[in-house]
Amino acid sequence: MKWIIAPLMLLLLSIPGSLLADDKLEAVVAALETPFRETTPPARQIHDFSADFVQRSTVVSIDRVQRGEGKVWFKFQPQSSFMPMFRWDYQLPDEQQVISDGSTLWVYVPANRQVIVSDVKQVEVEYGDNPAAFFSGLGDLARNFHIDWAPSRRDASGHYLLLLTPRQPSQFFKQIEVTVNQQAVSAYQQRGTPAQFPLIATQVTDPQGNLTQITFINVRWNLDLDDTEFVFEIPSGVEQLSPATHMSF
């Protein structure tokens, strides 16, 4: 069975922190982190968001590139011990849905007529060093990663590039490069408010050197998304599989 779960979830939002080398680096990290902190005033928080996304996965051993795209929704639960709620709807290369209400995770590929249903806490136990396990830590970034500038501090559009390495060795990823919106950094420095969504893209490099890049497009936030958007109703005739060990992160 073929899944592209990890690339999508890693993303997002496993964006961490470290000892900071200079004031500008500190400002970029703060602009990325502050909207997701529990201590940030509610008017300055990002409570939820939706976006279109484009995924580009490169398998270096066979020089193969696969493109995926779809739409994603996230809803954060600052007062909860659960991970954020999220929903990834892939249209390309194949239709696929990855949905979680914070306690249960569903992975559904209509063409297979199968859905994997997992307990989120068990997923965290089985795959604790996967980037997907860090979604709940966006407001406390220094906990899991060292952070520094990427070799090129900015991309062609002037956005900031951060290089993140896990504090503990991981079997799933070697490093994460994060693209941070320069306008979000400027707005944070001037007003301390999320005038722009801070996250533009992530690129994960695994221990074999394979790359998975996800770029967020047409981002909207604080939409007051309903919890029902993050619950999957299993269609009639679809086989249910468990536990989480059926998934290939």
Image (cartoon, grey):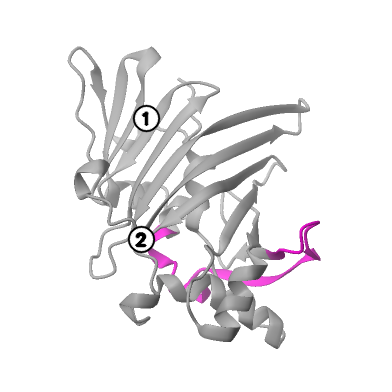
What x and y, as percent, mark residue 245? 36, 35
Which mark is in front, 2 or 1?
Answer: 2
Q: Which residue shows up at 78% across the image and 59% down it?
A: 155
Q: Which quadrant is home to the N terminus?
A: top left
Residue 246 is tagged as 1
Viewer-proximal residue among 113 and 119: 113
248 over 220 or under it: above or below: above
What x and y, as percent, mark residue 26? 63, 82
Q: Secondary structure at mark 1?
A: helix
Question: The magenta stretch spans which residues?
Answer: 135-162
Viewer-proximal residue among 119 and 152: 152
Q: Which residue shows up at 46% across the image and 30% down it?
A: 90
Q: Which residue shows up at 63% across the image and 29% down it?
A: 67
Residue receiving disc 2: 222
Q: Which residue shows up at 54% across the image and 70% down it?
A: 32
Q: Are marks 2 and 1 in contact (CB under 8 Å)?
A: no
For residue 226, say whether it is visible.
yes
